[in-house]
Image (cartoon, rainbow, N blue to C red):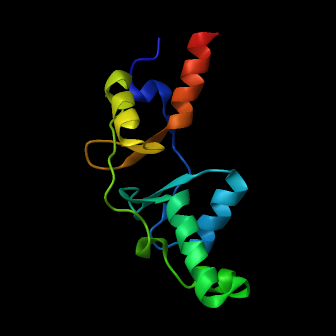
Amino acid sequence: MLTTVADLMTPDPLAVSKTNTLNDAHNLMREKNIRHIPVIDDDGMLVGMLTQKIMIAKVMGIIATYGTNALERKEKQQQVAEVMATDFASVQPQQSLQEVVRFFVDNRHGCMPVTDDNGKLLGILTSSDFVRLAAALLS
């Protein structure tokens, strides 16, 4: 039976460095069909989150200001660290799924990064993980 975050999380998730460009992150999101990307420093410590919502707002702002033709060039000029969210919740692998699912429901989060006690990125837990769990339990 799945009872902890570690049981359900995706370990070693795709992540970007805080020095990667928006273009790098945009391409990763598009190619891998993901909506949330943890942002890490050189030591693998979680320093931010880049979400589809943030990316869409940034892309729309660039297009509105500079036009579609400038999108790729402008994305390559901006680092992820300049736009990533730094105010976010994270969870630890030993936390119970019961505790964490309540936070997802109450706060409408699409994902939560999973870290160790020191803040090193270990995994990611998404609302899709809970949907898959519900589907399995209903089968």
Give the quadrant of residue 43. bottom left
Tell me the residue at 56%/79% (across/down): 61
Residue 88 locus on image (x, y percent): 33, 53
Asked whether, in this view, residue 50 is left or right of residue 118, the answer is right
The quadrant in which residue 84 appears is: bottom left
* Residue at x 50%, y 64% (from the top left corner): 54
Which residue sits at x=63%, y=58%?
A: 29
Could you say where residue 66 lies in the image, as x and y percent from the top left?
A: 63, 89
Horizontal relation, residue 16 to residue 136: left or right = left
x 34%, y 35%: residue: 103
The foreground one among 132 and 77 is 132
Total numbered labels placed on residues in the image: 0
- Residue 21 in view here: no
Q: Residue 13 or 35: which is nearer the viewer?
A: 35
Q: Quadrant of the C terminus?
A: top right
- Give left or right: position of 32 versus 65: right
| In the image, farthest residue toward the left | 117
Q: Is residue 52 visible?
A: yes
- In the rendered image, the vertical position of residue 133 relative to residue 119, given as above or below: above
Q: Position of residue 119 (x, y in %)?
A: 30, 50
> In x, y percent, where is residue 136?
60, 16
